[in-house]
Image: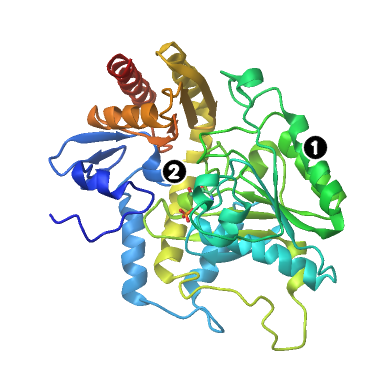
Amino acid sequence: MDLSAWWMPFTANRQFKSDPMLLARAEGMHYFTPEGRPVLDGVAGLWCVNAGHGRREIVDAVAKAITELDYAPPFKIGHPYAFSAADALKAILPPSFSNVFFVNSGSEAAETALKIARAYHIARGQPDRVWLVGRERGYHGVNFGGISVGGIPHNKAAFGPLLREVDHLHHTHDLDRNAFSRGQPVEGAELADDLLRIIDVHGAEKIAAVIVEPMAGSTGVLPPPKGYLERLRDITSEHGILLIFDEVITGFGRLGAAFVAQRFGVEPDMIAMAKGMTNGVIPMGGVAVQGHVHDALMRGPAGTIELMHGYTYSGHPAASAALMATLKIYAREQLFERARSLEAYWEDAVHMLRQAPNVIDVRNIGLVGGIELNPLEGRPGARGNDVYRRAFDNGLLTRVTGDTIALSPPLIVTEQQIDEIVEKLGNAIAASSKELE
Ligand SMILES: Cc1ncc(COP(=O)(O)O)c(C=O)c1O
């Protein structure tokens, strides 16, 4: 196979092409390489295959939908698949959420939420509310809005000027106080008060929205400190600032509930989602908004397009059908509840990795784990990459960011498979430590 033409995303292309890793097939909890070697999926593909691989009823629903209606434009005309999918999604959202705007990815979901936030304030006669506040170590996809509010310097460095009216909260990662926390760290609720500093600098009347991942995933699994999200909600509400939760990773059961609102009882004004929406089968994302956000924009003379925004493939029949079939599986197999009930077993299992060499932190929440490794001097990320590769060669797919290995298996994972994930990763860490010392 010629590997040269595909310019791969977030990949060291030249290195990859000299030493490729390939997946050819998937079923249940496993991938299979082209040679037929099974690889246990410790990361639900890329945090998205929450119901496990090869779910026939999603594939059948997609096939049926596109056989009947391959494509229909979503601007000024509709089709039953998208309306029914929005209804089905609304049924698992907190009751205050009235509407869903469909997009095609997590990046588009974040971008859409940011644009709705600005449009909301303009519609309410507060056009000066333009500042968007993200958080250090935040990831909101790769579009210009997302990387502007995002807090990963590497993701911005090559792309020149970004959005200007953007500021960032201090991140919540604090190994001195919270290393080896089980579940939510105890220390750090006061970090939400950093928003008061930003309000002091710019003025609350200039700030449109705060966007955070309730649990930062891409920068290495950072569960929210106890009380932090609650405090952020209080401050934003007090100052008329919209709160956006980017639940692209945390939505659809990853933290043992449909969304963080149901897990922690904190309701943002908007929820950006993607990943688990269609079990990874078809690209789809969405932004769910509370009634007051939607209603503020439903104004203007008859015939006015209220939001000048949308995508050719918003609510595509195939994606809508995949979403409905996926939600049916989640409900029938009670996978969100399953994730919650496995959480204690998962926590005990991943914290065993504390004993492995060079592990400087283990973090967990829901069915997510983060194992942070001591970076090699002068070579940040090298140890993480080495462990990632060894785990793969040993039959386990993980995700690596810097020197943190992230785990987030499909919610169908068994206790035995959890043990297998921990054993394989422990072996990879030990072998890597031996080799690299
Ligand atoms: C919190 C968050 N937001 C946005 C995105 C971007 O999603 P996508 O890659 O589908 O554009 C991701 C992807 O990992 C994410 O974790």
Residue under the image location 45 percent in, 34 percent down: 402
> Residue type at mark 2?
Trp
Return the residue at label 1.
193
Q: Which of 333 and 244 is in front in this view?
A: 244
Q: In which quarter of the image is residue 60?
A: bottom left
Q: Is residue 77 left or right of residue 226?
A: left
Is the distance from the Cβ of mark 2 to the nearest ligand 1 atom less than 8 Å? yes
Residue under the image location 69 percent in, 38 percent down: 170
Q: Which mark is residue 76?
A: none
* Badge 2 element: helix
Q: In this view, does 241 lie to the left or right of 172?
A: right
Q: Position of residue 380 (x, y in %)?
A: 44, 30
Q: Where is residue 319 in the image (x, y as percent from the top left)?
A: 43, 64
Q: Position of residue 248 (x, y in %)?
A: 53, 49
* Badge 1 element: helix
Q: Is residue 320 depicted above or below 132 in this figure? A: below
Q: Which of 364 and 194 is in front in this view?
A: 194
* Direction top: furthest residue: 355
- Quarter of the image where the C terminus is located: top left
Q: Nearer the viewer, residue 426 or 90?
A: 426
Q: In this view, does 160 lie to the left or right of 12?
A: right
Residue under the image location 14 percent in, 56 percent down: 2
Return the residue at label 2.
47
